[in-house]
Image: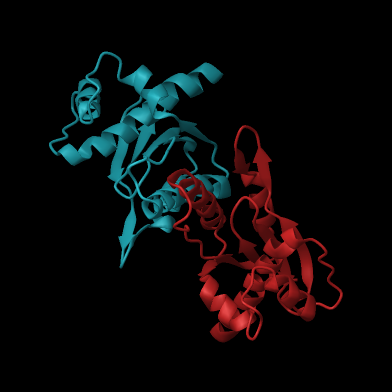
Chain colours: A red, B cyan
Amino acid sequence: MDKIIGIDVGFSGAIAIINAKDKSIIELMDMPIITTSATELNENVIKEILSDKDVKHVFIEKAQTMPQNGVVASFRYGAGYGVIRGICVGLGVPYSLCHPSTWKKKMMKDMPKEKYSSILRVCQLYPGLVMPRKKDHNKAEALLVGLYGLTCVLENSN
Amino acid sequence: MDKIIGIDVGFSGAIAIINAKDKSIIELMDMPIITTSATELNENVIKEILSDKDVKHVFIEKAQTMPQNGVVASFRYGAGYGVIRGICVGLGVPYSLCHPSTWKKKMMKDMPKEKYSSILRVCQLYPGLVMPRKKDHNKAEALLVGLYGLTCVLENSN
């Protein structure tokens, strides 16, 4: 079964694994992290997820730092973003970076421009999906990034 | 022939490939980059270098952002740092992060605390090495990070 992956980056990000054929959700998970004195990505767990031989493409939300962030937070956010891209490179899995404005234009058409709209939208698309917690919006975004990639990038390349 | 690698991160960083047995230099190179409208790491070239089956360990200078950097530069520097770590993870090559103060304390003992001292030091250690350009200090640092790792991390772990 071919799988594609959508990733919302950041320590409170998420990973969505999607069946490329019927767009069903295989798994939605929080970003694997390890917290000691500082939070770091759990690199080997992410590697294990992405190294599944059925994974055909990884779609990663293009990350940018926000002007309100400090330099340390920006550096750490960038490093986490880089680690995920680097794991794809090391594994030899093709990846694409999806700019937020691009995937939202396609996947969030006519939805309110609000942080939690992504939860509304995925619940419309997947009637069986239950997302009771506001913090699930990262999982919802990972799922939408993956669906965007599947719909707009992969299908157009055939 | 077992090899170890030292990396000075950043777009103007460098990579040193060292023979783990006799500490001879196999190759010293500038960080592989691609410059379009912005500079990016040439990820697949870096992957090719690190995927040599003889590479036993990668030592990466632990990067931190500088307070004088802006948030965008910090983010981009962090992303490049993350990509290199991620490539190691994806390839399954062990890596270690070496804090500048730690490797310098060991490798730059009694040297002037000045940016270009690293060139002086590697030219002392390798009498055949010629480094005429000031900008070679990144190659010199990559080499010293690799040597530090070989001497202090790997040899002590046996």
Q: In the rendering, at what x and y percent does residue B81 appear?
A: 44, 46
Decide if residue A3 is in sight here: no
Q: In the rendering, at what x and y percent does residue A111 appear?
A: 66, 81
Q: In the rendering, at what x and y percent does residue A37 appear?
A: 61, 32
User: Is B122 drawn above or below residue A89 in the view shown?
Assistant: above
Q: Nearer the viewer, residue B100 or A104?
A: A104
Q: Is residue A5 left or right of residue A62?
A: right
Kindly identify the residue that appears in the image at 39 percent across and 24 percent down.
B101
User: Is A120 drawn above or below residue B21 in the view shown?
Assistant: below
Q: Is residue B40 left or right of residue A108?
A: left
Q: In the rendering, at what x and y percent does residue A44 appear?
A: 64, 45
Which image quadrant is residue A49 in?
bottom right
Q: Which quarter of the rendering shows the C terminus of chain B?
A: top right
Most distant residue in the top direction? B110
Q: Which quarter of the rendering shows the N terminus of chain B?
A: top left
Which image quadrant is residue A56 in?
bottom right
Which image quadrant is residue A116 in?
bottom right
Q: Nearer the viewer, residue B21 or A127?
A: A127
Most distant residue in the right direction? A128
Q: Is residue B15 left or right of residue A127?
A: left
Q: Nearer the viewer, residue B43 or B80?
A: B80
Kindly identify the residue that appears in the image at 68 percent across and 62 percent down.
A138
Kindly identify the residue that appears in the image at 33 percent across and 56 percent down.
B33
Q: Is residue A123 left or right of residue B76?
A: right
Decide if residue A39 is in sight here: yes
Kindly identify the residue that appears in the image at 33 percent across and 61 percent down.
B34
